[in-house]
Amino acid sequence: MGYNFILCGTEKPDDIIDAAFSMHGGFQRLAECKADLTSESLLAAKNNLLIIDCQGYRTGEAYGDMIGTIKNVLENDQPILLYKPESFHKKMLIEADILAVCIEDPALACCLIPQRDEEGKLYIKTLEYCGIMETEAVCQRDLMRMDAEDQIAIVKSDEFRIQPGGNLTISELEPFINTIRESMHVLKKEGRIACTALENQPPADIPKTLWFKDLLILYMTCRPVGASESGFTPPTGSIVLEMGIDVSAYYDNANYSTPVQVINIVSKGHTTVTMCDNNADKRGWSLSAVEVDGSNISSSEIVSVASSPNNVSNQVQYTAGNEFSIGVEAGTEGMAASASYTISNSITKNISEWDIVQKDSNTWVFKQRVPYDGTISNFPKGAASNDGVTDLPDISKTSLYLDTNTLWRKTPASKSTLSLQYAFKILARYTWADKHDSTSYHAWSWHYSQTDYKYISVNLGRAYPTKN
């Protein structure tokens, strides 16, 4: 039994969808199987992926007709892929109480993967492929020269504004597509996908209307480039950012005179670096630094309670995590007795030869420490020598893990929706030694900087009593 891809919103899939899925199953138009889908006879097979081409639903009214189908498919443990969704396509899922959290910005693709906990409660994990970072980038180019008299100087320095472009490749989509394939494989084998992202959730006697925990995973590709020099052009690089943003909120009316909501945001991500060159003559593109800049949402109603990791320097590991207690009074949502519970999360990662700088309660810079500071934009001391281009830490050449945790408290508790801005900044470097020997060296270095922005909607009404 292969997979069945139910296509709606268009007559046939775009090439990128066809290439990614056609080898694993066939496409079927929604109109051809609507009766079976409604009667759930088709969904009983547990091998379907509903693909909605959002270009075919350009108005809220047209898309609204699909909401019932989306709910039915998810409640039957089948994943859904939204292709090229706009902001309103995702926000309507929050309004329909399908999601508690969503990325507001348009995307190339957004996949909703239903999961079940041990009690059978449904949770939705959201995967979003944002595509190639298209925001304007800055590239600085420097020439460093050392002559026979050991005089070192930056001979030339200039800066370029770059508007990235290019076509997306299937290989760049692989982390996103593979996660969908793995989920469908588990679904077909087990009949449902077990929820594995809810460690330390509230105990069973806490009504599920008083808390939520939604996981977003976004993928974006940075393609660093550099201007030509002396007949040499650095090849185009590839750095893929996979960032999980785990957002949860908990209603508390026992520990404070006024009911509050505690909002916990855990970021778990990593970058995957594909080095174009890695030898004494040229190295790059390497990862120099990553900045995760979340909204500082402190206000008259929202205060920052805790955050981690704090500044970490000259260490081989770092730990991110917070612990907090929640209390609920008897009578809330019909509870027979008062209850309290503790939420705790902690994760430890290696950070050898890199540092972490916490700029504020929700902003961190992960940066290379040796052989030079990765945030330096001009030619850094230590990037090259008579022996050529200096080797770099493994993190800079392969993969960096980024884990952060911020805790907020909202007073009073409400059904409002928060809009949080996140900025993801990637710094990359390419260094080329056009000459190096025992008496002198010439080396060029390109420093690339690019920032992408995302807005996240958080519906606090999902952590609020439904009964007076």
Image (cartoon, rainbow, N blue to C red):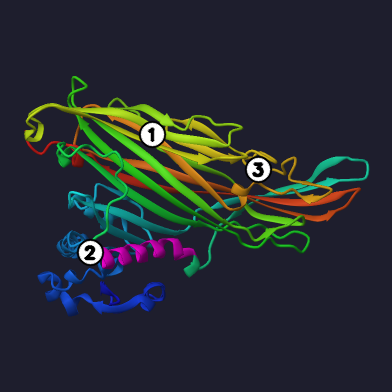
Mark 3 or 2: in front is: 2
* Above or below: residue 366 compared with residue 8: above
Q: Determine contact: label 1, label 2, CB under 8 Å.
A: no
Provide residue 247's location: percent of width, then percent of height: 32, 42
- Quarter containing the C terminus: top left
Disc 3: which residue = 377
CA–CA distance in space, label 3 to label 2: 52 Å
Dot 1, how many residues are within 10 Å of its Cα: few (below 14), some (14-19), or many (20+)?
A: many
Q: Residue at x 38, y 78 (%)?
A: 23
- Quarter containing the N terminus: bottom left
Displayed quadrant of residue 276: bottom right
Query: Which span of residues is magenta-colored?
Result: 172-190
As drawn, which residue projects farthest toward the right? 149
Instruction: Look at label 2 and name its amino acid.
Output: Gly
Q: Earlier in the sequence, mark 1 or mark 3?
A: 3
Number of dots carrying numbers? 3
Disc 1: which residue = 406
